[in-house]
Image (cartoon, coloured by chain):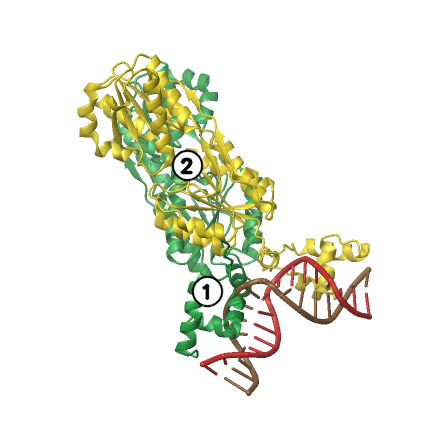
Chain colours: A yellow, B green, C brown, D red
Amino acid sequence: MKSRIFSINDIARELNISASTVSRALKDHPDISEETKKLVKDFAQKVNYRPNVLALSLRSRRTNTLGLIIPEIAHHFFSSIVSGIEEFAYGNSFRVIICQSNEDQAREFINLQALIDHRVDGILVSASKNTVNFEHFRKVLEKEIPIVFFDRISDELPTDRVITDDFEGARSISRHLLEKGRRKFLHLATPKNLLLGKDRYRGFQQALSDYQINPADAYVLQCDTRQDVIRMKDQILRIAPQIDAVFAVNDFSAIAVMQLLQENGYTIPDDIAVAGFGNDPIASIVYPSLTTVEQRGFEMGRESARLLIERIENPSKMIYPRIKVFESSLIIRNST
Amino acid sequence: MKSRIFSINDIARELNISASTVSRALKDHPDISEETKKLVKDFAQKVNYRPNVLALSLRSRRTNTLGLIIPEIAHHFFSSIVSGIEEFAYGNSFRVIICQSNEDQAREFINLQALIDHRVDGILVSASKNTVNFEHFRKVLEKEIPIVFFDRISDELPTDRVITDDFEGARSISRHLLEKGRRKFLHLATPKNLLLGKDRYRGFQQALSDYQINPADAYVLQCDTRQDVIRMKDQILRIAPQIDAVFAVNDFSAIAVMQLLQENGYTIPDDIAVAGFGNDPIASIVYPSLTTVEQRGFEMGRESARLLIERIENPSKMIYPRIKVFESSLIIRNST
DNA sequence: ATGAAAGCGCTAACAG
DNA sequence: CTGTTAGCGCTTTCAT
């Protein structure tokens, strides 16, 4: 038993009226008589009529769609952001097309192209780790397609930005370690091109300075994934005897280093305290549970979508780039 | 400095030729002279022309887009599936629109509707936990839009299906526990409406029978998330003294139960061995690391996309529903 | 109260 | 070798 997809023209033909009447009847235009309306609506209902959004978008030059480019869907922080974005977008009749860059600038570029091709009304981006050149985004802005950056932002483009207070987050968790009497640190950092990494590093340095410790005395390794930790284990173990605390730029490297240390006879936190960043669900599951910084992913996603949709709805209005900073909060557990 | 999006008509006007000539030149139609081609292509390049896929799709009645409905993007198994689907789809010039049902049948229905509205060429679905009625999918099939179910499948619809060998996976991990001398089991099961849960339970029962143990002697609780375990902790702890092994239907409930037992003085695996299902990355990170069953998410995704695209490319060809079963493999770690 | 026509961007049949 | 025309599904003047 086959059914088929009816268009307005199909309905018009079946009912022996014109397409424009059908169109008007369907949207309760006052000119149309009640009986015609009923006739059309009943029939539309019966054949399960659904407007073709392609035709709608082609005509209106609006797709009511947001494009989202995200490094990796699998991370809890990012999937919370996605949920936040979707919540706000759906609530305002926008759809979201999700693209993963897989932390690859080339893929990011392809995604961006595809989103433009699909005529999305606006774009949300968290840059990939190896994105150093933001020119492709500038071209999009020149087409008057608004962009909002979140978390992994660029500071060279005049766009709205939504970020965590990375500086304060890093500073407060570092102070927490200092309050616990720790003085000799290893910091696991991200590559330098991400502002986020720079800010977390600065917050860490500031905390040390606050305690009259020379930041230059801290060990710093560029190491921000579980794989990095495994790759650099010899180096880390060589440093381990000189330190009493590790502050990692994210929870995954924090947990990996914690386990590496445990396997090599260190007790956490007695010998070495370990702190992460992000409050991934896994942080509360590992042993010992991980002290970390909560990032408000869902709210950040919602706010990003809000800013973007506001621009889309007011294309002519000149709005200066806005920066929304979300406070992070310290989650103290048993690893410190 | 503003730029704008050029259409074929814009180009035609600028170059004083017809739109069809531009269209043909752009796709290297043999009729067009080399000089015209060069003229058009150079100009198109210069203004960064990109075809409007909405117009293309409207005309061709093909969107080259797959719709994907998935319970939760955040789970590693599902995000692997997504990656597999994307890999095959992109490699064959298809895009993927991802929708999350958040384990909610109502949302699943809305997603399905939205995908149809966008005229996707085919749909991939893993059903939500509370999906009991599959009629909405039947209506889609009646519109001749192909559907492929994966992992959380329905067996009442004549569609292609891609699943893990849940029965054998559960049987082999249960046998492993039996080989380790375990005899008194608790099984944490899913709600009955998912075939997957039924099959894992059957595999478990079969293993017991293989060892002349009455399956009815095993404890069974309906409990398939971390939250469920926490909610049912009293019940579980009451059972704990009678058992020497737990087989959980997924890694999250396995890990939660493992930690609950540890907190209450049990040693894993000495007092009670614990096994999960799925091989989530977290399984290798918890202490002790979790014995589990590997599901080949990426390959399952790729195969699902392959089956779907094959149907899309051969709309007239009558193909009987196919069922692809992926072998699962036992991952033995330290919890058993 | 309804219909005819034009156009969003694109392509293909048909015509020269 | 290139142009004209029509149509994908829809809305919106402008007629009637």
Q: Position of residue B160 (x, y in %)?
A: 44, 52
Mark 2 crowd level (few <14, some 14–19, many ≥20, 10 Å Cα): some
* Placement of A117 over or under B189, stated as above or below: below
Quadrant of the drawing holding the C terminus of chain B: top left
Say if mark 1 contacts mark 2, CB within 8 Å: no
Tell me, yes or no, if residue B265 can be seen here.
Answer: no
Q: Is residue A45 left or right of residue B288?
A: right
The residue that mark 2 highlights is: B75
The secondary structure type at the circle numbered 2 is loop
Label 1 marks which chain's residue?
A: B
Q: Of the residues under marks 1 and 2, which one precedes in the sequence?
A: 2
Residue in the foreground of this view, choosing between A37 and A124: A124
Q: Is residue A134 left or right of residue A228?
A: right
* Placement of B175 over or under B121, stated as above or below: above
Q: Position of residue B209 (x, y in %)?
A: 34, 32
Question: Which of the 4 image quadrants contains residue B267?
Answer: top left
Tell me, yes or no, if residue B273 can be seen here.
Answer: yes
Label 2 marks which chain's residue?
A: B
* Residue placed furthest toward the front: B1
Residue in the foreground of this view, choosing between B204 and B274: B274
The secondary structure type at the circle numbered 1 is loop
Nearest to viewer (mark 1 / mark 2):
2
The residue that mark 1 highlights is: B317
Q: Is residue B265 left or right of residue B136?
A: left
Q: Position of residue B287 (x, y in %)?
A: 30, 24
Q: Position of residue B253 (x, y in %)?
A: 40, 28
Specify the amino acid type for callout 2.
His
